[in-house]
Image (cartoon, rainbow, N blue to C red):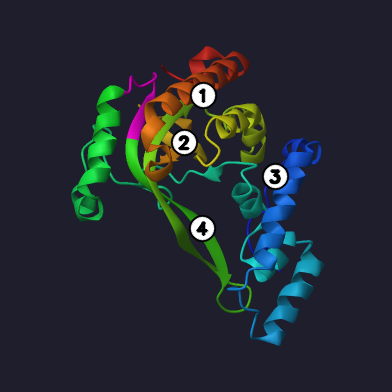
Amino acid sequence: MSLVLPREEEVENIFSRILSSNESCERLAEIFYEHLSDDNRSADPNPHHFAEVLLNAYKNGDVSAILLELCNRSMFDLLKEAYLIPKRFHGKSGENPVLLTDADGNLLEDKKELVTRHEYKKFHEVYESHHAAPRSKLYLADGYDLIRYYTSGMNICEQPENKERGILVLYALPDTKKMNLTEAQAYDVIWSTFHEIQKEAFSAIVYYGQESGCRSGKPFDELGVLLPIHQFEAKMLQHLGVIDGLVLSCREEMLKSAGSNILDL
């Protein structure tokens, strides 16, 4: 039987980083046990389904299959929720995050009724005041946690929960697939930058997409940082300035490793 989710490849480096950090291990354990002790979580009402999941997980060496049964998260979902790796960026037309404005700062026609006057005013003030870094754009966006559930047998579905509305700054980065890196290896490349962003703005939501962007027929990676308005409203510009510097330094190091012609600036 196939795995319930595709297995991430070349994960050794990112796992070594987590295991070498007591703080990272504590975060991971805390988020896992928090889900297990959630009073609102109900046990699988079908004992046969529980046994099916458990035995198939054992047979296939599929830890995510049993984690989905226990807490509705895969292994990488737990790492993302513990702020150890970025969430996957699904592209500008993707379902997480959902963009509410275009690249020029205008509300999308089908999103106008979803945004309050105060939210758009705050976004527009920041959009007009922030001096965007090269190959970066600001958007108003909604970010989510993607929660997975078993439907029947070993089939699963995804459901967005815990919406956070904020200002998303999106940066173009070199194409790591062209550098022959897997997604997990790309996370390892940006490890230091990701954690520096967390130090600057702990509850910021960081996204990463391999080849999620395209310009003149050339794909590129994208790193996004969503700053929830209700948490960062007072110092939004200050945080954006620091994050710009962190990501630009990361981009420069990636370009040195890959060759400057891998990303048109």
Residue at coordinates 52% horizontally, 42% vertically from top-left?
203
Look at the picture and state if 136 lies above or below 78: above
Mark number for residue 9? 3
Q: Amino acid at mark 3?
A: Glu
Q: Earlier in the sequence, mark 1 or mark 2?
A: 2
Quarter holding the N terminus? bottom right
Separation of marks 3 and 1 at Cα, in angstroms: 25 Å
State the image coordinates of residue 96 (x, y, percent, origin top left). Answer: 43, 50
Query: Pointer 1 and pointer 2: residues touching (CB < 8 Å)?
Result: yes
Mark 2 or mark 3, whichever is nearer to me? 2
Separation of marks 1 and 2 at Cα, in angstroms: 10 Å
Residue designated by label 2: 225
Residue at coordinates 35% horizontally, 22% vertically from top-left?
132
State the image coordinates of residue 154 (x, y, percent, origin top left). Answer: 63, 73
Q: Is residue 264 left or right of residue 83?
A: left
Q: Residue 136 lies in magenta, yes or no?
A: yes
| Label 1 Cα neighbours within 10 Å, binned few <14 / some 14-19 / many ≥20 | many
Separation of marks 2 and 4 at Cα, in angstroms: 17 Å
Query: Pointer 2 and pointer 4: residues touching (CB < 8 Å)?
Result: no
State the image coordinates of residue 204 (x, y, percent, origin top left). Answer: 50, 39
Mark number for residue 64? none
Query: Pointer 1 and pointer 4: residues touching (CB < 8 Å)?
Result: no
Q: Amino acid at mark 1?
A: Val
Q: Amino acid at mark 4?
A: Leu
Q: Is residue 71 left or right of residue 216?
A: right
Residue designated by label 4: 146
Separation of marks 3 and 4 at Cα, in angstroms: 21 Å
Q: Earlier in the sequence, mark 2 or mark 4?
A: 4
State the image coordinates of residue 21 (x, y, percent, origin top left). Answer: 78, 37
